Image (cartoon, helix red, strand yellow):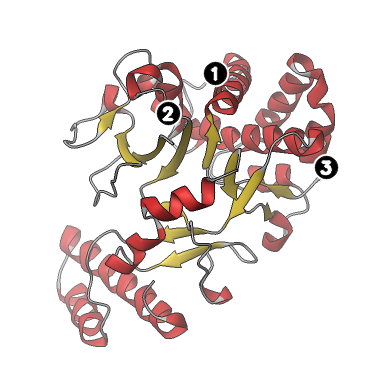
């Protein structure tokens, strides 16, 4: 069984790679630096130059349009350099979640034990007999929001009318998705992070669906004057495309979907989370200025977070 899971990288970070895990740099068309030992999203047919709008979805588009060049795998999936599936469904103390009431857990850093959660053997065991793997859905009421639309408007620079444009497009172009659109519009549950693994046929079907809808919204929004955070609107809306697709598939009941826990890496560097290091960086942040002060303050905050997680349940 041939499986490709692409991990999107936009900056230089520690690589996770194996026969299945495949790093890909996104936004290469406008990147200041191109990294070695990973694929690039600006070869073949691509939308790399629009990464500021599509975010990690430029990797999905590249894989869709250059599928045969990648060996035509039976399954294809996507993760992020710091957000991963826990293929053994590992979980941490509930206090260690990224979002309250969710199933994505903070992890201090990459360790040998952490890599075991992402081992090829684990992946092969979990994907056997499945059509699609996604993260467990999230209920935004845990954030105090009543609906998914309300939560979207709380994201940096995002506007409710863009969400409405997406739903209008799906109802117009895919009338059989009306119930899924109603569920997303009126409900509080969604699938996060643009993360999934799908059989080849489903991946092609979903990518056609997703990028057709996003192109419809893109035509209606003048993004030339948007600030960088607002300009990421298509990347955010891509999560709703995934939710719509899965809601519709669940309604039809024709595919097997496995929902897993996920992780959120606080750092991909090797850091010593000790009280001594915390005190050192706190001291240095008080006697330095400018860039050095910002660096030491960030390290102090990071080690404080790691120490708190160590108290909860230790390293992954």
Q: Which residue is mark 3?
A: 186
SS for tag 3?
helix
SS for tag 2?
loop
Query: Total of numbered circles in the picture?
Result: 3
- Is label 3 or label 2 in front? 2
* First reached walking from the N terminus: tag 1 or tag 2: 2
Query: Residue 14: x, y in percent?
Result: 24, 52
Query: Residue 1: x, y in percent?
Result: 44, 36
Crowding at dot 2, Cα within 10 Å, few <14 / some 14-19 / many 20+, comes out as some
* First reached walking from the N terminus: tag 3 or tag 2: 2
- Is label 3 or label 1 in front? 3
Residue 259 in sight in this render: yes
Residue 266 in sight in this render: no
Quarter-of-image position of residue 173:
top right
Give the side of residue 96 with respect to residue 237, left or right: left
* First reached walking from the N terminus: tag 3 or tag 1: 3
SS for tag 1?
loop
Query: Residue 143: x, y in percent?
Result: 67, 60
Mark 3 touching mark 1, by CB under 8 A?
Answer: no
Q: How far apart are the alpha carbons under marks 1 and 2? A: 37 Å
Query: Residue 247: x, y in percent?
Result: 74, 38
Q: Which residue is mark 2?
A: 73
Q: How far apart are the alpha carbons under marks 3 and 1? A: 27 Å
Give the side of residue 42 with respect to residue 289, left or right: right
Going 60% across and 27% down the picture, which residue do you hit? Answer: 202
Give the side of residue 144 with respect to residue 60, left or right: right
């Amino acid at each position: 069984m041939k499986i490709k899971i692409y991990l999107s990288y936009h900056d230089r970070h520690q690589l996770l790679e194996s026969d299945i895990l495949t790093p890909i740099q996104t936004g290469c068309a406008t990147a200041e630096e191109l990294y070695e030992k990973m694929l690039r999203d600006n070869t073949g047919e691509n939308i790399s130059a629009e990464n500021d709008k599509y975010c990690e979805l430029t990797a999905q588009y590249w894989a869709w349009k250059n599928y045969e060049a990648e060996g035509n795998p039976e399954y294809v999936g996507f993760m992020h350099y710091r957000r991963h599936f826990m293929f053994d469904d590992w979980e941490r103390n509930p206090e260690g979640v990224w979002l309250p009431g969710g199933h994505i857990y903070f992890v201090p850093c990459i360790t040998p034990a952490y890599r075991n959660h992402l081992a090829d053997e684990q992946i092969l065991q979990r994907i056997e007999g499945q059509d699609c793997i996604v993260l467990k859905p999230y209920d935004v009421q845990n954030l105090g929001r009543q609906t998914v639309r309300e939560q979207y408007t709380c994201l940096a620079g995002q506007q409710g009318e863009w969400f409405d444009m997406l739903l209008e497009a799906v109802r117009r172009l895919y009338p059989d998705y009306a119930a899924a659109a109603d569920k997303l519009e009126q409900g509080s549950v969604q699938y996060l992070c643009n993360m999934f693994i799908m059989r080849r046929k489903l991946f092609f079907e979903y990518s056609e669906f997703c990028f057709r809808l996003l192109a419809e919204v893109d035509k209606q929004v003048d993004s030339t004057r948007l600030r960088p955070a607002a300009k990421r609107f298509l990347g955010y809306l891509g999560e709703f495309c995934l939710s719509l697709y899965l809601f519709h598939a669940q309604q039809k009941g024709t595919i097997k979907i496995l929902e897993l826990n996920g992780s959120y890496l606080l750092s991909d560097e090797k850091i010593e989370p000790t009280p001594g290091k915390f005190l050192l960086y706190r001291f240095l942040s008080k006697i330095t200025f400018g860039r050095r002060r910002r660096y030491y303050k960030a390290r102090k905050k990071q080690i404080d977070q790691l120490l708190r997680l160590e108290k909860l349940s230790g390293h992954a």
